[in-house]
Protein backbone atom coordinates (compact mmCIF):
# COMPACT_ATOMS: atom_id res chain seq x y z
CA UNK A 1 0.00 0.00 0.00
CA UNK A 2 1.27 3.51 -0.80
CA UNK A 3 2.66 5.56 2.11
CA UNK A 4 -0.08 7.73 3.60
CA UNK A 5 1.48 11.00 4.70
CA UNK A 6 -0.70 13.00 7.12
CA UNK A 7 -0.71 15.93 4.66
CA UNK A 8 -2.35 13.67 2.05
CA UNK A 9 -5.50 13.79 4.11
CA UNK A 10 -5.53 17.44 5.10
CA UNK A 11 -4.06 18.68 1.79
CA UNK A 12 -1.95 21.38 3.50
CA UNK A 13 -1.06 22.27 7.07
CA UNK A 14 -1.48 25.74 8.50
CA UNK A 15 2.22 26.31 7.80
CA UNK A 16 1.84 25.83 4.03
CA UNK A 17 3.83 23.65 1.67
CA UNK A 18 7.37 22.45 2.42
CA UNK A 19 10.16 24.13 0.45
CA UNK A 20 13.93 23.92 0.07
CA UNK A 21 16.08 26.67 1.56
CA UNK A 22 16.00 28.44 -1.78
CA UNK A 23 12.20 28.26 -1.86
CA UNK A 24 11.46 25.42 -4.31
CA UNK A 25 8.40 23.31 -3.41
CA UNK A 26 9.40 19.82 -2.22
CA UNK A 27 7.37 16.96 -3.62
CA UNK A 28 8.74 14.21 -1.35
CA UNK A 29 10.31 14.56 2.10
CA UNK A 30 10.22 10.84 2.98
CA UNK A 31 12.19 9.13 0.21
CA UNK A 32 15.54 10.06 -1.37
CA UNK A 33 15.98 10.05 -5.14
CA UNK A 34 17.54 6.74 -6.24
CA UNK A 35 18.52 5.14 -9.53
CA UNK A 36 15.85 2.47 -9.62
CA UNK A 37 14.07 0.63 -6.80
CA UNK A 38 17.26 -0.72 -5.18
CA UNK A 39 19.86 1.59 -6.76
CA UNK A 40 22.12 4.21 -5.15
CA UNK A 41 21.12 7.77 -4.25
CA UNK A 42 21.81 10.41 -6.92
CA UNK A 43 23.87 13.50 -6.25
CA UNK A 44 21.17 15.49 -8.07
CA UNK A 45 18.95 15.10 -4.97
CA UNK A 46 19.66 18.65 -3.81
CA UNK A 47 16.93 18.50 -1.15
CA UNK A 48 18.58 15.50 0.56
CA UNK A 49 22.09 16.94 0.34
CA UNK A 50 21.04 20.39 1.51
CA UNK A 51 19.04 18.89 4.38
CA UNK A 52 21.96 16.76 5.59
CA UNK A 53 24.53 19.52 5.06
CA UNK A 54 22.46 22.02 7.02
CA UNK A 55 21.91 19.47 9.78
CA UNK A 56 25.67 18.81 9.91
CA UNK A 57 26.13 22.49 10.76
CA UNK A 58 23.30 22.86 13.32
CA UNK A 59 25.56 23.21 16.36
CA UNK A 60 27.43 26.44 16.84
CA UNK A 61 30.11 26.81 19.53
CA UNK A 62 28.42 26.98 22.91
CA UNK A 63 29.27 29.94 25.11
CA UNK A 64 32.68 29.29 26.71
CA UNK A 65 30.97 30.13 30.02
CA UNK A 66 27.25 30.49 30.84
CA UNK A 67 26.43 27.85 28.19
CA UNK A 68 23.22 26.60 29.85
CA UNK A 69 20.50 29.21 30.03
CA UNK A 70 16.92 30.31 29.51
CA UNK A 71 15.53 33.61 28.28
CA UNK A 72 12.36 35.66 28.04
CA UNK A 73 11.08 38.93 26.63
CA UNK A 74 9.47 41.69 28.64
CA UNK A 75 9.67 45.36 29.43
CA UNK A 76 11.25 47.79 31.84
CA UNK A 77 9.13 50.62 33.23
CA UNK A 78 10.49 53.71 34.96
CA UNK A 79 8.78 54.12 38.34
CA UNK A 80 10.96 56.86 39.83
CA UNK A 81 12.59 59.90 38.27
CA UNK A 82 16.41 59.69 38.13
CA UNK A 83 16.83 62.13 35.23
CA UNK A 84 18.96 64.31 37.54
CA UNK A 85 21.49 61.43 37.64
CA UNK A 86 21.68 60.43 33.97
CA UNK A 87 20.70 61.66 30.53
CA UNK A 88 19.87 58.09 29.39
CA UNK A 89 16.69 58.65 27.39
CA UNK A 90 15.03 55.40 28.41
CA UNK A 91 15.18 56.66 32.03
CA UNK A 92 13.90 60.15 31.23
CA UNK A 93 10.28 59.98 32.45
CA UNK A 94 8.21 58.04 34.97
CA UNK A 95 5.97 55.56 33.18
CA UNK A 96 8.27 55.19 30.17
CA UNK A 97 8.55 51.58 28.95
CA UNK A 98 11.49 49.95 27.15
CA UNK A 99 11.37 46.43 25.70
CA UNK A 100 13.89 43.99 27.20
CA UNK A 101 15.20 40.50 26.58
CA UNK A 102 16.66 38.70 29.59
CA UNK A 103 18.81 35.57 29.71
CA UNK A 104 19.54 33.66 32.91
CA UNK A 105 22.23 31.00 33.07
CA UNK A 106 24.57 28.88 35.13
CA UNK A 107 28.28 29.53 34.58
CA UNK A 108 30.53 26.47 34.54
CA UNK A 109 28.38 23.69 33.08
CA UNK A 110 27.93 22.72 29.46
CA UNK A 111 24.68 23.22 27.56
CA UNK A 112 23.24 19.94 28.82
CA UNK A 113 24.26 20.42 32.46
CA UNK A 114 21.86 20.62 35.39
CA UNK A 115 20.18 23.91 36.29
CA UNK A 116 20.56 23.08 39.97
CA UNK A 117 24.37 23.25 40.14
CA UNK A 118 26.00 25.24 42.94
CA UNK A 119 27.24 28.04 40.71
CA UNK A 120 26.61 31.77 40.27
CA UNK A 121 23.69 32.53 37.95
CA UNK A 122 24.03 34.89 35.02
CA UNK A 123 21.48 37.71 34.91
CA UNK A 124 21.78 39.48 31.53
CA UNK A 125 19.27 42.09 30.38
CA UNK A 126 19.20 43.71 26.95
CA UNK A 127 17.36 47.05 26.99
CA UNK A 128 16.22 47.99 23.46
CA UNK A 129 16.29 51.78 23.97
CA UNK A 130 15.71 54.57 21.46
CA UNK A 131 19.45 55.25 21.53
CA UNK A 132 20.56 51.69 20.91
CA UNK A 133 20.90 48.72 23.24
CA UNK A 134 22.15 48.75 26.80
CA UNK A 135 23.17 45.32 28.08
CA UNK A 136 23.27 44.91 31.85
CA UNK A 137 25.37 41.72 32.03
CA UNK A 138 25.31 40.84 35.71
CA UNK A 139 25.06 37.89 38.03
CA UNK A 140 22.78 36.87 40.92
CA UNK A 141 25.70 37.62 43.24
CA UNK A 142 26.82 41.20 43.97
CA UNK A 143 30.54 40.30 43.94
CA UNK A 144 32.97 38.12 41.97
CA UNK A 145 35.90 35.76 42.68
CA UNK A 146 38.68 37.83 41.11
CA UNK A 147 39.37 41.50 40.39
CA UNK A 148 41.75 41.42 37.45
CA UNK A 149 40.69 40.12 34.01
CA UNK A 150 44.11 38.53 33.54
CA UNK A 151 43.01 35.85 36.00
CA UNK A 152 39.67 35.03 34.33
CA UNK A 153 40.73 32.25 31.91
CA UNK A 154 42.73 30.53 34.70
CA UNK A 155 39.83 30.84 37.11
CA UNK A 156 37.36 29.38 34.61
CA UNK A 157 39.69 26.47 33.81
CA UNK A 158 39.56 25.50 37.49
CA UNK A 159 35.75 25.50 37.46
CA UNK A 160 35.56 23.23 34.42
CA UNK A 161 37.00 19.77 33.80
CA UNK A 162 40.44 18.34 34.55
CA UNK A 163 42.45 18.31 31.29
CA UNK A 164 43.31 14.61 31.73
CA UNK A 165 40.41 12.93 33.50
CA UNK A 166 37.74 15.24 32.01
CA UNK A 167 36.16 15.30 35.47
CA UNK A 168 35.41 18.17 37.85
CA UNK A 169 38.43 18.40 40.11
CA UNK A 170 38.38 19.50 43.77
CA UNK A 171 42.15 20.11 43.72
CA UNK A 172 41.92 22.52 40.79
CA UNK A 173 38.86 24.27 42.24
CA UNK A 174 40.25 24.84 45.73
CA UNK A 175 43.91 25.20 44.77
CA UNK A 176 43.13 28.32 42.76
CA UNK A 177 40.68 29.82 45.28
CA UNK A 178 43.05 29.24 48.19
CA UNK A 179 45.83 30.98 46.23
CA UNK A 180 43.53 33.91 45.40
CA UNK A 181 42.20 34.95 48.82
CA UNK A 182 40.21 37.90 47.45
CA UNK A 183 37.78 35.22 46.23
CA UNK A 184 36.57 34.61 49.80
CA UNK A 185 33.59 36.98 49.66
CA UNK A 186 32.16 35.31 46.55
CA UNK A 187 33.07 31.84 47.89
CA UNK A 188 30.98 32.63 50.97
CA UNK A 189 27.99 33.74 48.86
CA UNK A 190 28.34 30.68 46.62
CA UNK A 191 28.53 28.19 49.49
CA UNK A 192 25.68 29.85 51.40
CA UNK A 193 22.00 28.97 50.92
CA UNK A 194 21.88 31.48 48.04
CA UNK A 195 24.43 29.39 46.11
CA UNK A 196 21.60 27.33 44.54
CA UNK A 197 18.57 29.48 43.63
CA UNK A 198 15.30 27.57 43.25
CA UNK A 199 14.81 28.63 39.65
CA UNK A 200 15.58 31.90 37.93
CA UNK A 201 12.47 33.75 39.15
CA UNK A 202 13.52 33.59 42.79
CA UNK A 203 16.86 35.38 42.70
CA UNK A 204 18.17 38.94 42.54
CA UNK A 205 20.44 40.37 39.84
CA UNK A 206 23.38 42.73 40.35
CA UNK A 207 25.59 44.66 37.93
CA UNK A 208 28.47 43.85 40.30
CA UNK A 209 30.61 46.48 38.63
CA UNK A 210 30.41 50.15 39.45
CA UNK A 211 29.31 51.91 36.25
CA UNK A 212 29.03 55.65 35.65
CA UNK A 213 25.83 57.64 35.19
CA UNK A 214 26.40 60.71 33.03
CA UNK A 215 24.41 63.93 32.62
CA UNK A 216 24.13 65.84 29.37
CA UNK A 217 26.59 68.48 30.69
CA UNK A 218 29.23 65.74 31.11
CA UNK A 219 29.03 65.59 34.92
CA UNK A 220 28.96 62.07 36.29
CA UNK A 221 28.59 59.91 39.37
CA UNK A 222 29.03 56.16 39.97
CA UNK A 223 26.28 53.56 40.22
CA UNK A 224 25.73 49.89 40.92
CA UNK A 225 22.51 48.30 39.68
CA UNK A 226 20.30 45.94 41.69
CA UNK A 227 17.35 43.88 40.41
CA UNK A 228 15.39 42.59 43.41
CA UNK A 229 13.01 39.70 42.79
CA UNK A 230 9.31 40.26 43.51
CA UNK A 231 8.81 36.48 43.72
CA UNK A 232 10.87 36.29 46.93
CA UNK A 233 14.27 34.65 47.33
CA UNK A 234 13.92 30.85 47.23
CA UNK A 235 16.86 28.49 47.35
CA UNK A 236 17.49 24.75 47.18
CA UNK A 237 19.45 22.92 49.84
CA UNK A 238 22.22 20.67 48.53
CA UNK A 239 20.36 17.31 48.83
CA UNK A 240 17.24 18.60 47.00
CA UNK A 241 19.43 20.15 44.30
CA UNK A 242 21.32 16.89 43.79
CA UNK A 243 18.03 14.96 43.52
CA UNK A 244 16.63 17.44 40.97
CA UNK A 245 19.86 17.30 38.94
CA UNK A 246 18.95 13.68 38.25
CA UNK A 247 15.15 13.94 38.04
CA UNK A 248 14.69 17.30 36.33
CA UNK A 249 17.98 18.85 35.23
CA UNK A 250 16.00 21.57 33.42
CA UNK A 251 14.22 22.63 36.60
CA UNK A 252 14.93 26.39 36.27
CA UNK A 253 14.34 26.52 32.52
CA UNK A 254 11.00 24.73 32.94
CA UNK A 255 9.94 26.90 35.88
CA UNK A 256 10.54 30.14 33.96
CA UNK A 257 8.89 28.94 30.75
CA UNK A 258 5.82 27.49 32.47
CA UNK A 259 5.27 30.50 34.72
CA UNK A 260 5.29 32.90 31.76
CA UNK A 261 3.17 30.53 29.65
CA UNK A 262 0.42 30.48 32.28
CA UNK A 263 0.47 34.30 32.68
CA UNK A 264 2.36 34.40 35.97
CA UNK A 265 4.83 37.06 34.85
CA UNK A 266 7.90 37.41 37.05
CA UNK A 267 9.16 40.89 37.89
CA UNK A 268 12.09 42.59 39.58
CA UNK A 269 12.25 46.04 41.14
CA UNK A 270 15.30 47.90 39.88
CA UNK A 271 17.46 50.15 42.05
CA UNK A 272 20.77 52.01 41.87
CA UNK A 273 23.29 52.76 44.58
CA UNK A 274 25.01 56.08 43.92
CA UNK A 275 28.55 57.14 44.85
CA UNK A 276 29.45 60.77 44.22
CA UNK A 277 32.97 61.48 42.93
CA UNK A 278 34.06 63.23 46.13
CA UNK A 279 33.09 60.20 48.26
CA UNK A 280 35.44 57.79 46.48
CA UNK A 281 38.72 58.78 48.15
CA UNK A 282 37.16 58.76 51.61
CA UNK A 283 36.25 55.06 51.62
CA UNK A 284 38.47 52.30 53.02
CA UNK A 285 37.80 50.08 50.00
CA UNK A 286 37.93 50.52 46.25
CA UNK A 287 34.49 50.90 44.66
CA UNK A 288 36.00 49.61 41.40
CA UNK A 289 36.96 46.31 43.07
CA UNK A 290 34.24 43.77 42.20
CA UNK A 291 35.07 41.60 45.21
CA UNK A 292 33.38 44.30 47.37
CA UNK A 293 29.77 45.47 47.79
CA UNK A 294 28.70 49.02 48.54
CA UNK A 295 27.21 48.64 52.03
CA UNK A 296 23.52 49.56 52.05
CA UNK A 297 23.97 51.62 55.23
CA UNK A 298 26.25 54.06 53.39
CA UNK A 299 24.77 53.73 49.90
CA UNK A 300 21.02 53.15 50.11
CA UNK A 301 19.09 51.58 47.24
CA UNK A 302 17.40 54.27 45.14
CA UNK A 303 14.35 52.96 43.25
CA UNK A 304 14.36 53.38 39.47
CA UNK A 305 11.89 51.02 37.85
CA UNK A 306 10.51 47.56 37.40
CA UNK A 307 11.36 44.80 34.92
CA UNK A 308 8.59 42.34 33.97
CA UNK A 309 9.05 39.26 31.81
CA UNK A 310 5.84 38.43 29.97
CA UNK A 311 6.67 36.56 26.75
CA UNK A 312 8.49 33.34 26.05
CA UNK A 313 10.77 33.10 23.03
CA UNK A 314 9.09 31.75 19.91
CA UNK A 315 12.28 29.88 19.00
CA UNK A 316 14.99 28.98 21.51
CA UNK A 317 17.94 28.94 19.11
CA UNK A 318 17.03 32.15 17.27
CA UNK A 319 16.38 34.18 20.37
CA UNK A 320 18.17 32.64 23.37
CA UNK A 321 21.14 30.82 21.85
CA UNK A 322 21.92 33.61 19.41
CA UNK A 323 21.52 36.38 21.97
CA UNK A 324 24.80 38.18 22.54
CA UNK A 325 25.15 40.45 25.56
CA UNK A 326 28.10 42.72 26.20
CA UNK A 327 28.99 45.13 29.00
CA UNK A 328 30.37 47.36 26.22
CA UNK A 329 26.90 47.83 24.72
CA UNK A 330 26.09 51.07 26.53
CA UNK A 331 23.82 54.03 25.79
CA UNK A 332 24.48 57.75 26.24
CA UNK A 333 24.11 58.39 29.98
CA UNK A 334 25.71 55.10 31.09
CA UNK A 335 29.48 54.74 30.82
CA UNK A 336 32.42 52.54 31.84
CA UNK A 337 34.68 53.17 34.84
CA UNK A 338 38.27 52.18 35.76
CA UNK A 339 37.01 48.83 37.18
CA UNK A 340 39.71 46.50 35.78
CA UNK A 341 37.39 43.53 35.38
CA UNK A 342 34.86 45.67 33.55
CA UNK A 343 37.58 46.97 31.22
CA UNK A 344 38.57 43.36 30.40
CA UNK A 345 34.95 42.42 29.79
CA UNK A 346 34.39 45.38 27.44
CA UNK A 347 36.81 43.62 25.07
CA UNK A 348 36.04 39.97 25.78
CA UNK A 349 32.30 39.80 24.98
CA UNK A 350 32.19 41.31 21.46
CA UNK A 351 35.32 39.27 20.75
CA UNK A 352 33.66 35.99 21.73
CA UNK A 353 30.48 36.97 19.83
CA UNK A 354 32.51 37.46 16.64
CA UNK A 355 33.88 33.95 17.18
CA UNK A 356 30.60 32.32 18.31
CA UNK A 357 28.15 34.04 15.97
CA UNK A 358 30.26 35.87 13.38
CA UNK A 359 31.35 39.45 12.73
CA UNK A 360 27.79 40.52 11.93
CA UNK A 361 26.27 39.15 15.17
CA UNK A 362 24.63 42.54 15.74
CA UNK A 363 22.49 42.01 12.63
CA UNK A 364 20.80 38.94 14.16
CA UNK A 365 17.27 40.13 15.05
CA UNK A 366 17.56 39.39 18.81
CA UNK A 367 20.72 41.52 18.98
CA UNK A 368 19.84 44.25 16.49
CA UNK A 369 18.88 47.56 18.09
CA UNK A 370 15.26 48.46 17.42
CA UNK A 371 16.40 52.08 16.98
CA UNK A 372 18.32 51.19 13.82
CA UNK A 373 21.98 51.23 12.82
CA UNK A 374 23.62 53.87 10.68
CA UNK A 375 27.35 53.47 10.21
CA UNK A 376 30.10 52.72 7.72
CA UNK A 377 30.67 49.06 8.62
CA UNK A 378 30.28 46.92 5.53
CA UNK A 379 30.54 43.34 4.28
CA UNK A 380 31.71 40.29 6.24
CA UNK A 381 30.12 36.87 6.59
CA UNK A 382 26.32 36.86 6.67
CA UNK A 383 25.56 40.51 5.98
CA UNK A 384 21.76 40.55 5.89
CA UNK A 385 20.75 44.16 6.46
CA UNK A 386 21.21 45.58 2.99
CA UNK A 387 24.83 46.47 3.76
CA UNK A 388 24.23 50.22 3.63
CA UNK A 389 22.87 50.03 0.09
CA UNK A 390 24.33 52.71 -2.16
CA UNK A 391 25.05 55.16 0.67
CA UNK A 392 28.60 56.45 1.26
CA UNK A 393 30.76 53.99 3.22
CA UNK A 394 33.25 56.47 4.65
CA UNK A 395 33.40 59.61 6.78
CA UNK A 396 34.08 62.47 6.35
CA UNK A 397 32.31 62.58 3.01
CA UNK A 398 30.65 65.16 0.81
CA UNK A 399 27.61 63.06 -0.12
CA UNK A 400 25.39 63.03 2.98
CA UNK A 401 26.45 59.84 4.77
CA UNK A 402 25.85 59.40 8.51
CA UNK A 403 27.84 61.83 10.66
CA UNK A 404 29.07 61.91 14.27
CA UNK A 405 26.70 63.42 16.86
CA UNK A 406 29.19 65.09 19.26
CA UNK A 407 26.77 64.06 22.03
CA UNK A 408 27.90 63.28 25.60
CA UNK A 409 27.39 59.62 26.46
CA UNK A 410 28.69 56.10 26.10
CA UNK A 411 30.80 56.67 23.02
CA UNK A 412 31.85 60.07 24.31
CA UNK A 413 34.67 59.53 26.80
CA UNK A 414 33.67 60.68 30.26
CA UNK A 415 36.24 63.04 31.78
CA UNK A 416 37.43 60.78 34.61
CA UNK A 417 40.79 61.85 36.04
CA UNK A 418 43.56 59.22 36.06
CA UNK A 419 47.15 59.55 37.24
CA UNK A 420 50.36 57.58 37.77
CA UNK A 421 52.94 55.72 35.74
CA UNK A 422 52.28 52.70 33.58
CA UNK A 423 52.94 49.43 35.47
CA UNK A 424 51.48 46.12 36.70
CA UNK A 425 50.00 47.24 40.00
CA UNK A 426 48.89 44.47 42.32
CA UNK A 427 46.00 45.05 44.69
CA UNK A 428 47.70 44.69 48.08
CA UNK A 429 45.81 42.01 50.02
CA UNK A 430 44.72 43.39 53.39
CA UNK A 431 42.18 42.88 56.17
CA UNK A 432 39.69 44.87 54.07
CA UNK A 433 39.55 41.89 51.70
CA UNK A 434 38.14 39.67 54.45
CA UNK A 435 35.80 42.08 56.21
CA UNK A 436 32.77 41.92 53.91
CA UNK A 437 32.85 38.12 53.84
CA UNK A 438 32.75 38.39 57.64
CA UNK A 439 29.77 40.75 57.48
CA UNK A 440 27.93 38.20 55.34
CA UNK A 441 28.88 35.30 57.63
CA UNK A 442 27.54 37.24 60.59
CA UNK A 443 24.23 37.95 58.83
CA UNK A 444 23.59 34.20 58.90
CA UNK A 445 21.75 32.38 61.68
CA UNK A 446 23.18 29.22 63.20
CA UNK A 447 21.46 26.91 60.70
CA UNK A 448 22.71 28.94 57.74
CA UNK A 449 26.27 28.92 59.14
CA UNK A 450 26.13 25.16 59.57
CA UNK A 451 24.92 24.62 56.02
CA UNK A 452 27.61 27.01 54.73
CA UNK A 453 30.32 24.97 56.47
CA UNK A 454 28.81 21.69 55.31
CA UNK A 455 28.52 22.84 51.67
CA UNK A 456 32.17 23.94 51.73
CA UNK A 457 33.35 20.70 53.31
CA UNK A 458 31.44 18.61 50.73
CA UNK A 459 33.75 19.98 48.06
CA UNK A 460 36.91 20.93 49.95
CA UNK A 461 37.22 17.47 51.56
CA UNK A 462 38.02 16.14 48.06
CA UNK A 463 41.11 18.35 47.77
CA UNK A 464 44.59 17.47 49.02
CA UNK A 465 45.30 18.26 52.69
CA UNK A 466 47.76 21.09 51.99
CA UNK A 467 45.06 22.83 49.94
CA UNK A 468 42.45 22.28 52.67
CA UNK A 469 44.82 23.87 55.20
CA UNK A 470 45.53 26.89 53.03
CA UNK A 471 41.80 27.47 52.47
CA UNK A 472 41.09 27.00 56.22
CA UNK A 473 43.57 29.81 56.94
CA UNK A 474 41.41 32.07 54.77
CA UNK A 475 38.18 31.13 56.59
CA UNK A 476 39.95 31.75 59.91
CA UNK A 477 41.15 35.14 58.74
CA UNK A 478 37.50 36.09 58.02
CA UNK A 479 36.22 34.81 61.37
CA UNK A 480 37.54 32.15 63.77
CA UNK A 481 34.03 30.71 64.11
CA UNK A 482 33.84 30.35 60.29
CA UNK A 483 37.15 28.43 60.25
CA UNK A 484 36.18 26.24 63.20
CA UNK A 485 32.86 25.23 61.65
CA UNK A 486 34.47 24.28 58.33
CA UNK A 487 37.25 22.37 60.08
CA UNK A 488 34.69 20.40 62.14
CA UNK A 489 32.78 19.48 58.96
CA UNK A 490 36.01 18.41 57.24
CA UNK A 491 36.84 16.15 60.19
CA UNK A 492 33.37 14.56 60.00
CA UNK A 493 34.23 13.62 56.41
CA UNK A 494 37.66 12.20 57.40
CA UNK A 495 39.28 14.56 54.96
CA UNK A 496 42.75 14.03 56.47
CA UNK A 497 42.85 17.47 58.10
P1 LIG B 1 22.62 44.75 54.78
O1 LIG B 1 22.24 44.04 56.02
O2 LIG B 1 22.05 46.09 54.52
O3 LIG B 1 22.28 43.86 53.50
C1 LIG B 1 22.51 42.48 53.52
C2 LIG B 1 22.23 41.96 52.14
O4 LIG B 1 22.59 40.60 52.13
C3 LIG B 1 20.81 42.03 51.71
O5 LIG B 1 20.80 42.60 50.41
C4 LIG B 1 20.37 40.57 51.64
O6 LIG B 1 19.54 40.37 50.53
C5 LIG B 1 21.67 39.89 51.38
N1 LIG B 1 21.83 38.51 51.82
C6 LIG B 1 21.31 37.87 52.87
N2 LIG B 1 21.75 36.60 52.91
C7 LIG B 1 22.58 36.44 51.88
C8 LIG B 1 23.33 35.36 51.36
N3 LIG B 1 23.36 34.18 51.95
N4 LIG B 1 24.07 35.55 50.25
C9 LIG B 1 24.10 36.76 49.65
N5 LIG B 1 23.38 37.82 50.08
C10 LIG B 1 22.65 37.65 51.18
O7 LIG B 1 24.21 44.77 54.81
P2 LIG B 1 25.35 45.43 53.92
O8 LIG B 1 24.88 46.16 52.74
O9 LIG B 1 26.24 46.16 54.85
O10 LIG B 1 26.11 44.12 53.43
C11 LIG B 1 26.50 43.10 54.33
C12 LIG B 1 26.80 41.89 53.52
O11 LIG B 1 25.62 41.51 52.83
C13 LIG B 1 27.84 42.16 52.44
O12 LIG B 1 29.14 41.98 52.89
C14 LIG B 1 27.44 41.22 51.36
O13 LIG B 1 28.10 39.98 51.56
C15 LIG B 1 25.96 41.01 51.54
N6 LIG B 1 25.20 41.70 50.48
C16 LIG B 1 25.30 43.06 50.35
C17 LIG B 1 24.74 43.66 49.25
C18 LIG B 1 24.97 45.12 49.00
O14 LIG B 1 24.84 45.54 47.83
N7 LIG B 1 25.27 45.92 50.02
C19 LIG B 1 23.94 42.92 48.26
C20 LIG B 1 23.80 41.51 48.57
C21 LIG B 1 24.46 40.95 49.62
P3 LIG B 1 17.92 40.56 50.58
O15 LIG B 1 17.69 41.96 51.04
O16 LIG B 1 17.52 40.34 49.18
O17 LIG B 1 17.43 39.51 51.53
C1 LIG C 1 29.22 35.24 29.59
C2 LIG C 1 33.89 36.51 29.75
C3 LIG C 1 33.29 38.22 34.24
C4 LIG C 1 28.51 37.74 33.71
C5 LIG C 1 30.56 35.38 29.27
C6 LIG C 1 31.17 34.93 28.05
C7 LIG C 1 32.47 35.29 28.09
C8 LIG C 1 32.69 35.95 29.34
C9 LIG C 1 33.53 35.06 27.02
C10 LIG C 1 30.44 34.20 26.94
C11 LIG C 1 29.61 35.19 26.15
C12 LIG C 1 28.92 34.61 24.95
O1 LIG C 1 29.41 33.64 24.36
O2 LIG C 1 27.86 35.17 24.58
C13 LIG C 1 34.13 37.11 30.97
C14 LIG C 1 35.39 37.69 31.37
C15 LIG C 1 35.23 38.15 32.65
C16 LIG C 1 33.85 37.88 33.03
C17 LIG C 1 36.64 37.76 30.51
C18 LIG C 1 36.20 38.84 33.56
C19 LIG C 1 37.22 39.55 33.13
C20 LIG C 1 31.95 38.29 34.49
C21 LIG C 1 31.34 38.96 35.60
C22 LIG C 1 29.99 38.83 35.44
C23 LIG C 1 29.75 38.07 34.23
C24 LIG C 1 32.09 39.70 36.69
C25 LIG C 1 28.88 39.37 36.30
C26 LIG C 1 28.95 40.48 37.01
C27 LIG C 1 28.31 37.01 32.55
C28 LIG C 1 27.00 36.63 32.07
C29 LIG C 1 27.21 35.90 30.90
C30 LIG C 1 28.63 35.86 30.67
C31 LIG C 1 25.65 36.94 32.72
C32 LIG C 1 26.14 35.24 30.04
C33 LIG C 1 25.49 36.23 29.09
C34 LIG C 1 24.40 35.54 28.31
O3 LIG C 1 23.37 35.20 28.94
O4 LIG C 1 24.57 35.32 27.12
N1 LIG C 1 31.52 35.99 30.07
N2 LIG C 1 33.22 37.24 31.99
N3 LIG C 1 30.95 37.74 33.68
N4 LIG C 1 29.26 36.55 31.69
FE1 LIG C 1 31.23 36.89 31.84
Image (tube, rainbow, N blue to C red):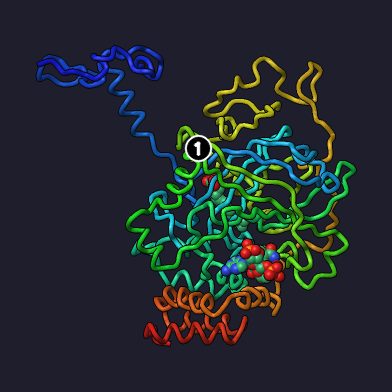
Quadrant that contains the C terminus: bottom left
Tell whether 403 sits left or right of 249: right
Image quadrant for the N terminus? top left
Neighbor class of circle 1 (other Cα within 10 Å; few <14, some 14-19, many 20+) is many
Question: Would residue 134 be seen by someone viewing this image from the given angle?
Answer: yes
The residue positioned 40% from the left and 61% from the top of the image is 161
Residue 64 in the image, given as x and y percentages of width and height: 49, 50
**Closer to us: 131 or 362:** 131
Q: Is residue 28 left or right of residue 254?
A: left
Q: Which residue is mark 1?
A: 312
Specify the farthest residue to the front.
Answer: 263
Query: On screen, 427 above or below 262?
Result: below
Position above or below: 59 against 160: above
In which image quadrant can residue 24 be found? Answer: top left
Asked whether mark 1 lies closer than 8 Å to ligand 2, one says no
Q: Is 252 or 467 nearer to us in this picture?
A: 252
Secondary structure under tag 1 reads loop
Left or right of 250? Residue 179 is right
Kindly indicate the quadrant of the structure image that contains residue 135: top right
The tally of labels here is: 1
Estimate the x, y position of residue 399 in percent, counting from the top left.
Answer: 79, 16
Rendered residue at 52%/43% (across/down): 264
Q: Is residue 411 visible?
A: no
Q: Is residue 189 above or below residue 24?
A: below
Identify which residue is drawn at 78% across, 63% down.
299
Q: Horizontal and vertical percent for residue 209?
A: 69, 57
From the top left corner, tell me how far across and down residue 158 is, in percent: 47, 65
In the rendered image, the residue lying farthest to the right is: 217
Amino acid sequence: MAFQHPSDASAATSFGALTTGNGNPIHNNQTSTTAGQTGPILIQDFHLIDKLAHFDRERIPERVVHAKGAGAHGYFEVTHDISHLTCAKFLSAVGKRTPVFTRFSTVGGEQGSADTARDPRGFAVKFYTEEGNWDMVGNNTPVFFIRDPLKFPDFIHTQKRNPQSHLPDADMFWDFLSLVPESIHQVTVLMSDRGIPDGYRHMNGYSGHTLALVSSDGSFRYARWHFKTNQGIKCLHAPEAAKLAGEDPNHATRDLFNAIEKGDHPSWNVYVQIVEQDQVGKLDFDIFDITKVLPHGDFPLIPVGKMTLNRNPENYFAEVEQSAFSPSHMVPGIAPTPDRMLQGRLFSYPDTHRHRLGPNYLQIPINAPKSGVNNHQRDGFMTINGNGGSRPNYEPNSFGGPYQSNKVGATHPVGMAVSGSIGNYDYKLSDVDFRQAGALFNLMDDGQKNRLASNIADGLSGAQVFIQKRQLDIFNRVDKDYGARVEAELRKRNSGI
